[in-house]
Amino acid sequence: MSGPATVSFNGGPEQAVELPHRWPRIPGPVTATYRIDIDLPRSETAFLLIPAAQHALSARLNGTRVPGTEIHIVGELSIGSPYMLEIPDGLGGSAEFIVTLTRKSGVIPGYLSPVYAVDESAMESVRWAWVFVTRGTRASMIGLQAIVILALATVWLARPRDPIFGWLLLIG
């Protein structure tokens, strides 16, 4: 689990916070920068888990950009998204994790949940699900479902009295 954290808003002074943390209501564009001391597992593959972050997130670990923040499994960033960030090899031990949450406009407060550092064995049972929902698989499945529905509707419209398509009335 994450250690002590500080936050600064729009480059202002840092203040100590406890995660989870919700911003105060600040109107307009806001950039919140969280600095978190974290102990990383000493394994070949490790992950940082952020169960919920509200607004656009970018992350750095000891100054190195952590890839994976551009993947959103929820469409709207102001609603909140979970993140599973793979830690680059060789970055085990004590580290400074910097999370930047950016809101371009509006008044929706930001939120950052606790951050968890885990090794690959802890992710074994759920990693396949994460890969499924964050890669192109999810978008492909939605596209294929739309094509099937369109094809069935086309056939039904062409032959509405065919008894084999009677079950399609249930979806109409």
Image (cartoon, rainbow, N blue to C red):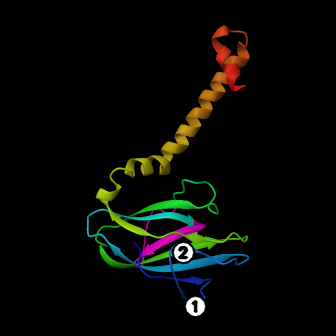
- Residue 154 visible: no
Label 2: how many residues lie within 10 Å, few (<14), some (14-19) or many (20+)? many
Label 1: how many residues lie within 10 Å, few (<14), some (14-19) or many (20+)? few
Dot placed on the residue nearer the N-terminal end, 2 or 1: 1
Where does residue 141 sit, x and y in percent of width and height? 53, 38
Placement of the C terminus among the 4 image quadrants: top right
Q: Name the residue nearer the viewer: 76 or 52.
A: 52
- Residue 135 visible: yes
Q: Quadrant of residue 48?
A: bottom left
Q: Is residue 15 magenta?
A: no
Q: Is residue 12 depicted above or below 56 in this figure?
A: below
Q: Residue at x 53, y 63 (%)?
A: 52
* Most distant residue in the left direction: 43
Mark 2 and 1 residues: CB-CB less than 8 Å, in contact?
no
| Element under disc 2 | strand
- Residue 13 is tagged as 1
Q: Is residue 110 left or right of residue 131?
A: right
Q: Residue at x 72, y 71 (%)?
A: 107
Residue type, label 1: Pro
Where does residue 36 sit, x and y in percent of width and height? 45, 79
Instruction: List the residue tagged with mark 2.
Output: 100
Q: Is residue 10 depicted above or below 116 in this figure?
A: below
Q: Is residue 165 left or right of residue 39?
A: right
Residue type, label 2: Thr
Q: Is residue 166 left or right of residue 68?
A: right
Q: Residue at x 62, y 71 (%)?
A: 110
| Element under disc 1 | loop
Where does residue 165 sit, x and y in percent of width and height? 65, 14
Q: Compute the Cα span from label 2 to label 1.
A: 15 Å
Placement of the N terminus among the 4 image quadrants: bottom left
Where does residue 90 sit, x and y in percent of width and height? 28, 71
Question: What is the span of residues highlighted in magenta in the rendered image?
Answer: 54-70
